[in-house]
Image (cartoon, helix red, strand yellow):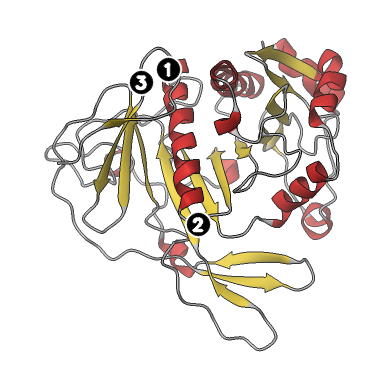
Amino acid sequence: MSKSLPLARTLGSKPTYVREHRKADGRMLRLYGREAHSLEPSAESADPIAQGGELRYHPLRSEWNVYAAHRQNRTFKPSAADDPLAPTVAGGVETEIPFADFELAIFENKFAAFHHSASDAADLAGIACEPAKGACDVVVYAPDASGSLHTIGQDRRQVLIAALIDRYDALFRAGCNYVLPFENRGDEVGVTLSHPHGQIYGFERTPVIQQRAVDAFAGGYDLAAEIAECMPDYGLGEEGGVAAFVPRFARFPYEVWLAPKQRREGPWDCSDEELEGLASWLGEMTRRYDALFDGPAATMMAFHAAPKGGSAGYHFTVQFYPLLRAKGRVKYLASVEQHTGTFTVDVMPETAVQMLRDVA
């Protein structure tokens, strides 16, 4: 039986442990928590799993897109009894986590778009095609079937950040050049599993949007100066040296960024105080969005950190993009946004920051 080992980087007054378990189908499951995990695994089946899709280059947009037809058959809104992210209990259905209990779990996605063993790609005249190498992880915040980054509490959010730093390091060492932890929340975003969770994508090459940010920072853009300029009027607060603010150039209604006031390349580069502040803000912003929209708010959240090896001038942020412009009203990305990338913003940043302050 595998043993739990303490992580090199941890937060809070207690260490964070990780236990690795190789699932019967070959995928790796990692269990993170404040206590060393020692439960025996349940019996597992070894069904075939997908090993990534393929990449095709779009010649007019200068971007690589991933094609993964096997994802059409991924689990879609199962019943509570068939929740694949729950613990496996005696007499119950087999889930992705073959243990009766856990604190936080990260495992390789069964329906991965990117995979380290991807090897197939189409041969299309005039179109560049490559295997979609990389990684796709699922991050399960807790064994409970309901909840959010707010309700799991500060201690569990600290475990989450320690786990993400561990995965950044492992995925960079495994050959990924860009790593994106993220959360999709709400039916409006297209979430197919209601159990509170996030994901991590590891990319073989830096995606085009992230590369633009890399280039902007390398060219001298100073986000620390922008934060200092905007905090009085557009700031929601500061904790542990981490600021929460509505960007003056926000594209989504009620968009919020979290960022250390001093330049850091990623969470691995932050002080313990900054990471504790970040953990607090992850919960607080989730709470504020739910209060603003009077219920679980549809949001897209992602960690934007430097690529493997670092990048000149890069400044780490966590960005929240709400999919609502008001209670019950979805912000649809329609023709202009999709075809040109020019967003029509329905709520002025000046209005958004005041409304988010009002629910503090």
Q: In the displayed structure, would residue 288 be above or below residue 321?
A: above
* Quadrant showing the C terminus: top right
* Quadrant showing the N terminus: top left
- The Cα atoms of the two marked residues, 2 and 1, are separated by 31 Å
- The Cα atoms of the two marked residues, 3 and 1, are separated by 11 Å
Residue on which disc 3 sits: 15
Q: How crowded is mark 1: few (under 14 residues within 10 Å), some or many (20 or more)?
A: some
- Give residue 232's position: percent from left, percent from top: 84, 13
Q: Residues within 10 Å of mark 3 (few under 14, many from 20)?
A: some
Three-letter amino acid code of the residue under disc 3: Pro
- Give residue 51's position: percent from left, percent from top: 40, 66
Residue on which disc 1 sits: 155
Query: Which residue: 51% across, 49% down?
Result: 172
Query: Which residue: 76% across, 73% down?
Result: 59
Q: In the displayed structure, would residue 221 be above or below residue 294?
A: below
Three-letter amino acid code of the residue under disc 2: Gly
Is 299 left, or right, of 7 in this rendering? right
Marks 3, 1: nearer the viewer: 3
> Counting residues from the N terminus, which is met first, the one under dot 3 or under dot 1?
3
The residue nearer to you, when weighing 290 against 267, is: 267
The residue nearer to you, when weighing 337 against 295, is: 337
- Give residue 36's position: percent from left, percent from top: 24, 26
Residue on which disc 2 sits: 175
Q: Kindly tell me whether residue 143 is visible in this rendering.
A: no
Mark 2 lies on a secondary structure that is loop
Image-quadrant location for residue 56: bottom right
